[in-house]
Amino acid sequence: MQDKRVKDAYSSYFKFNNERTLSTDLESELFSVEAEACSAFVDRTRKYDNQIIIHDVCNTGNLESHLKLYKHGFSPEVSIEPQAVTNRLKTWLSNSGFVPDYSMSFSN
C-alpha cells in the first residue's frame, strides 16, 4: 500500500491539475473519497478527472459503492496498484464492464 505521504502528494497534485484545467467553462465540482484501500476522485464537470485508485486488496462491495459516485455519466479510470491485483478483482472489473487499457511491466 502507498505511503500516506505519497497518497497525500498525489491527491494534492490531482486537485491542482483539476483547478488549472481549461477543458470546460464550468467551475470544478471535484471531491474525493477515501475508503478501505481505495481512493475515488469524482468531478461531473471534467471527463478526465474521474478516477478510482485501488491501493490494496479490498471488498468489491466498497468498489460497488464507489462506482455509484459516477452516475453523472463520466466513467472512472480504474488504477490498480500491484499488491491489489487478484483474480477476483479482475473478474469483478470485467463483469462491471471495465477492460484493461494498458499495462506497464518492468523487469531486470
Image (cartoon, rainbow, N blue to C red):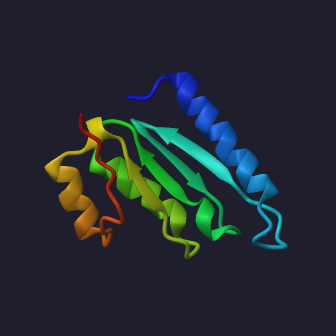
> Which quadrant is the C terminus positioned in?
top left
Q: Is residue 58 above or below residue 77?
A: above
Please name the residue shown 71% across and 46% down the image: 15
Q: In screen coordinates, is 70 left or right of 55?
A: right
Q: Is residue 34 above or below residue 6?
A: below
> Which quadrant is the N terminus positioned in?
top left
Q: In screen coordinates, is 68 left or right of 9?
A: left
Residue 99 location (% of width, % of height): 30, 69
- Determine the residue located farthest toward the bottom in the rendered image: 73
Q: In screen coordinates, is 77 left or right of 50?
A: left
Residue 33 location (% of width, % of height): 56, 44
Residue 97 location (% of width, % of height): 31, 73
Please name the residue shown 24% across and 38% down the image: 107
Q: Is residue 103 above or below residue 85?
A: below
Of 100 and 87, the residue lying toward us? 100
For the image, the number of numbered tags is: 0
Residue 73 location (% of width, % of height): 55, 76
Of 29 and 101, the residue lying toward us? 101
Q: Does residue 57 show up? A: no
Q: Which quadrant holds residue 27?
A: bottom right
Q: In screen coordinates, is 29 left or right of 86?
A: right
Please name the residue shown 23% across and 69% down the image: 95
Of 107 and 88, the residue lying toward us? 107
Q: Does residue 12 show up? A: yes
- Determine the residue located farthest toward the left in the rendered image: 87
Please name the residue shown 27% across and 35% down the image: 83
